[in-house]
Image (spheres, helix red, strand yellow):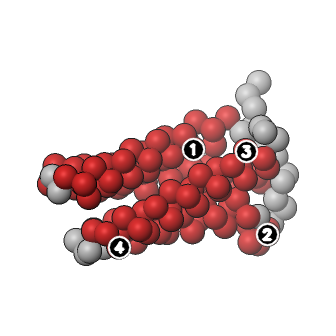
Amino acid sequence: MYEKEVYHFLFLHFPIALFVTGYIFHILYTITDNYDYKKNIFLIMGMGILWSILSIITGYITAFESEKMKVFSDILNKNHSNIMLISTLIFICIYLLRDKNNKILLFFHTIAIFLLTYGAHLGAKWADRI
């Protein structure tokens, strides 16, 4: 038999890795001003956003199946859920505003990475992994 959480765990690590890799490229672009880094930032972030949306969907499915949430409005009561939604929305905004001031985008990229890390920590606590 399978564990109900397995699908969410399969999806959640990929966007985290993509967002962190994109952040590293963003720092390198800021330091070197090499256009290749800028191109890679947004290719990686675009894939991270797609996988993040899939991870959020599988997270909700897992929460409902494991009966940690009874109704959809319970989402608003979970810090993990709220923080992951907010960080994904920030990544989407950064992606859409990619031609704007690089240093401001890097600032918001830093905030999104911190939120992503903290939200992942809360998710691990919620799933009794730590």
Amino acid type at circle 4 is Ile
Q: Residue at x 64, y 64 (%)?
A: 83
- In the image, residue 55 lies at what x, y percent? 56, 50
CA separation, marks 4 and 1?
A: 27 Å
Q: Nearer the viewer, residue 82 or 75?
A: 82
Dot 3 or dot 4: first in sequence order is 4
Q: Residue furthest front?
A: 31
Q: Residues within 10 Å of mark 2 (few under 14, many from 20)?
A: few
Which residue is disc 3 drawn over? 124
Dot 4 or dot 1: first in sequence order is 1
Dot 4 or dot 2: first in sequence order is 2
CA separation, marks 3 and 4?
A: 30 Å
Dot 2 or dot 1: first in sequence order is 1
Q: Residues within 10 Å of mark 4 (few under 14, many from 20)?
A: few
The kind of secondary structure element at disc 1 is helix
Dot 2 or dot 3: first in sequence order is 2
- In the image, residue 129 lies at what x, y percent? 77, 37
CA separation, marks 4 and 2?
A: 31 Å
Q: Residue at x 65, y 56 (%)?
A: 119
Which residue is disc 2 drawn over? 77
The kind of secondary structure element at disc 2 is helix
CA separation, marks 2 and 1?
A: 21 Å
Q: Nearer the viewer, mark 2 or mark 3?
A: 3
Which residue is disc 1 drawn over? 12
Q: Nearer the viewer, residue 121 or 33?
A: 33
| Residue 19 can be seen, yes or no | yes
Amino acid type at circle 1 is Leu
Which residue is disc 4 drawn over? 104
- In the image, residue 30 lies at what x, y percent? 26, 58
